[in-house]
Image (cartoon, rainbow, N blue to C red):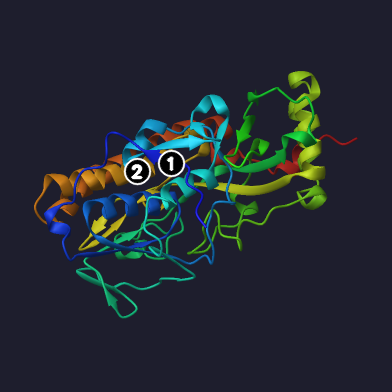
């Protein structure tokens, strides 16, 4: 059952577009980018089907997002975003991915999202089909390792030079911890944030940014998602590399009176850790025929840009504006196309700038194995 975390706004989304009458849209991928676009297209009057390969909802998945433009999300959905019964705000703590997902999911009619459906083929881009069902538009939102992006472009993500170890723990398991913020030691970086969920759970999320040679990371396969259970395996205790905790102690033991190390030791004992090699991407095209790519399928960026999910919401807003400004589907997609590419390229440029902080000044070839950096004891 759904637990509503939004209330209507006085300013509702725009009315239906005449072109949407009797037109069907498929959205492939039910993460934030896919659901944001689905909300917009539903509001415009299209019949919308969302295909998601995962078998269940995402409200209990994901990490924390430090930046969320609540006003923009509310504008997209036409509803106030609530957290624990009051207006959601950054002052309450970082935003939980699962809560944001549910906010968008609740904007769609029951049955819109078809879970357990893997889509690998669209047929003709001018008349796309999924199975035996024909669609007037297909929105590809199946992630940075998209299976369907090939219908629009053959370009692929590139490795950024570092791995982010994402960590989470219940706040009660680290009593008294309050040293939140970003801490640096050369190219090594760690961040700790309080995380507040709508359900009432208080957690701490932490990230460690560690330069790692490309030879030591595995490039994800096509179809890999950021939140799929098969890929997002969480490591506990000594399942992380043997060098991880000694290196963390070495780089951050002198910061915050040793509190960061206390936090990481608690996470490894009682919390969750998942390594995420960072890849960056900007599509050189976002439309082909009646197929359009959005979200991570169009752009991937460092989490430290803080605007990856934000840009996916901007994609959806831009789709709405394109359909509102034109009289036909093809004209709307053409209008969307140029700004969509520019938006992806701008995020990529910003991500490249941010990522330079996490790799040696000499470049990728100067990255050494983290295992070699731990001092012998």
- Neighbour class for label 1 at 10 Å: few (<14), some, many (≥20)? many
Q: Residue at x 80, y 37 (%)?
A: 266
Can residue 330 be seen from the camera position used here? yes
Circle 2 packing at 10 Å, graded few (<14), some (14-19), many (20+), is many
How many marks on residues?
2
Q: Are marks 2 and 1 in contact (CB under 8 Å)?
A: yes
| Residue at x 75% of width, y 28% of height | 260
Q: Position of residue 258 (x, y in %)?
A: 80, 23
* Residue 283 visible in the shown view: no
Q: Is residue 328 above or below residue 339?
A: below
To which quarter of the image does residue 350 belong?
top left
User: In the picture, residue 119 is in which quadrant?
Assistant: bottom left
In the displayed orientation, state which residue is furthest to the left.
Answer: 327
N-term-proximal mark, 2 vs 1:
1
Compared across the picture, whether 70 is left or right of 304 comes to left
Look at mark 2 in the image and give the residue it sits on: 77
**Residue beneath label 1, please?**
6
For marks 2 and 1, give the CA distance. 9 Å
């Amino acid at each position: 059952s759904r637990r509503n975390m939004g209330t209507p706004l006085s300013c509702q989304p725009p009315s239906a577009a005449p072109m949407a009458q009797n037109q069907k849209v498929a959205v492939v991928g039910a993460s934030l980018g896919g659901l944001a676009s689905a909300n917009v297209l539903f509001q415009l009057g299209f019949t919308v089907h969302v295909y998601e390969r995962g078998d269940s909802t995402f409200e209990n998945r994901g990490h924390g997002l430090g930046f969320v433009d609540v006003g923009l999300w509310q504008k997209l959905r036409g509803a106030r975003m609530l957290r624990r019964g009051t207006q959601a705000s950054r002052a309450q703590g970082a935003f939980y991915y699962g809560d944001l997902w549910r906010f968008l999911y609740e904007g769609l009619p029951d049955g819109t999202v078809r879970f357990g459906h893997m889509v690998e083929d669209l047929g003709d881009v001018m008349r796309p089909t999924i199975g035996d069902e024909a669609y007037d538009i297909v929105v590809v939102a199946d992630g940075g390792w998209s299976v369907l992006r090939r219908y629009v472009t053959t370009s692929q993500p590139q490795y950024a030079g570092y791995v982010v170890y994402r960590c989470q723990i219940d706040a009660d398991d680290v009593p008294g911890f309050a040293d939140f913020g970003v801490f640096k030691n050369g190219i090594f970086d760690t961040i700790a944030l309080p995380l507040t969920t709508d359900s009432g759970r208080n957690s701490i999320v932490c990230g460690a940014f560690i330069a790692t040679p490309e030879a030591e990371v595995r490039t994800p396969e096509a179809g890999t998602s950021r939140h799929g259970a098969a890929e997002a395996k969480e490591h506990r205790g000594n399942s992380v590399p043997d060098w991880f905790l000694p290196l963390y102690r070495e780089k951050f033991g002198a910061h915050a009176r040793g509190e960061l190390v206390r936090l990481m030791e608690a996470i490894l004992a009682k919390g969750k850790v998942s390594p995420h090699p960072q890849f960056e991407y900007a599509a050189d095209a976002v439309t082909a025929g009646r197929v359009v790519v959005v979200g991570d399928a169009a752009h991937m960026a460092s989490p430290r840009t803080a605007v990856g999910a934000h840009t996916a919401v901007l994609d959806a807003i831009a789709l709405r504006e394109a359909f509102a400004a034109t009289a036909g589907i093809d004209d709307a997609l053409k209008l969307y196309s140029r700004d969509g590419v520019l938006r992806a390229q701008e995020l990529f440029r910003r991500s490249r700038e941010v990522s330079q902080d996490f790799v040696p000044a000499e470049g990728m070839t100067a990255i050494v194995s983290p295992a070699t950096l731990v001092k012998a004891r």
